[in-house]
Image (spheres, rainbow, N blue to C red):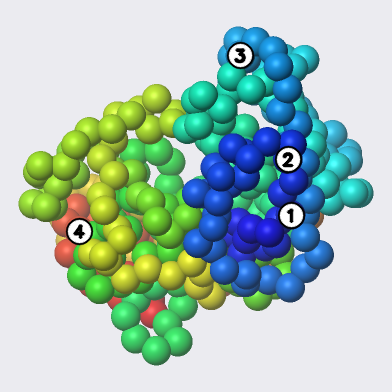
Amino acid sequence: MFYPLGYPLLVESNDIEPLRIAAESWGARRRLFDAPPLRLTIHVHKGDPPADKPTYQASADGFLLVCDSANRAEFSIRAHAACLHITRVVLDRPEWFRHQLLECLVLTALDTVHFVGMHAACVVPPGELKPGLLLCGTSGSGKSTLAYACARIGWTFVSDDSHLAQDGSGVVTGNTHEIRLREPARELFPELHTSATVTAPNGKQCIEPDLQSTVPRSDSASARHCVFLSRRPGRATIREYSEDDAVEYFMGYNSRFDRSGAEGHLRDFVRGSTWLLEYERLDDAIDVLGGLA
């Protein structure tokens, strides 16, 4: 039993290697939510490696991930179960298997039945019972950089890419062990000057700071504010942001077949708590963010 994003997942396989990889991904996660487990069955068999990444196809009862006829997965909402078929040679590339198939399948399944993906970083200001803040914006807007800047001065880092629970609690969870920064971050944070450049699973070059012992972390937070980021010269300012535009932004990353439920949860969540932060300097931006808590 594993607990990706805090939900129970029962994984079965005819091969030990997928279970080992699953343990690397989620073995350290604790249970956060009381729900029946999702079931994942992994069938490993002989055959050729997949020719390409999987394609995604949503349906009323779930979705498919298909590389080819021998490497494919399906998830059923009704059964709360997934089945993954892979050829044994796929396991010779464990990181490809993890990112393209295993984690993609499980996290998409969880986002289909339990969560709404937010495409936002989440940090929590220091202090008792402070709500988490979601840092939002398109790729390159500075979400990860600002989240890391907050974390290195004592804010709690929750995730670089967040998932909102659909139970109305406002709880956000994600991968608390990893954040990816673009190359210009070296000039902002001295400790990154000697950090290696790595290739992320999406093929982009990035820096992955070691978060294990350097910043406060939590695998979940009760979040309240959605802050959209905009870089411009001058002092940092914050003002209200359109709730409709916020929902449209989040829904742009939603791939469900039936999107109405996700949109409803998002509208409830953003009501009265969406902001536009315009800033140039990170320390200025953090000061303004602290005023929201």
Q: Secondary structure at mark 4?
A: helix
Tell whether label 4 touches label 3 (CB within 8 Å). no
Residue 70 appears left or right of 191: right
Of all residues shown, which one is farthest toward the right?
78
Mark 4 vs mark 2: in front: 2
- Asked where in the image residue 237 lies, by quadrant, the reply is bottom left
Q: Residue at x 52, y 49 (%)?
A: 25
Q: Residue at x 54, y 57 (%)?
A: 27
- Disc 2 target residue: 13
- Disc 4 target residue: 282
Q: Secondary structure at mark 2?
A: strand
Of callouts 3 and 4, the N-terminal one: 3
Q: Hey, what amino acid is under mark 3? A: Pro
Q: Label 4 to label 2, Cα distance in Å?
A: 47 Å
Mark 3 vs mark 2: in front: 2
- Asked where in the image residue 1 lies, by quadrant, the reply is bottom right
Q: Label 3 to label 4, Cα distance in Å?
A: 45 Å
Mark 1 vs mark 4: in front: 1
Q: Label 1 to label 3, Cα distance in Å?
A: 26 Å
Residue 137 appears left or right of 150: right
Of callouts 4 and 2, the N-terminal one: 2
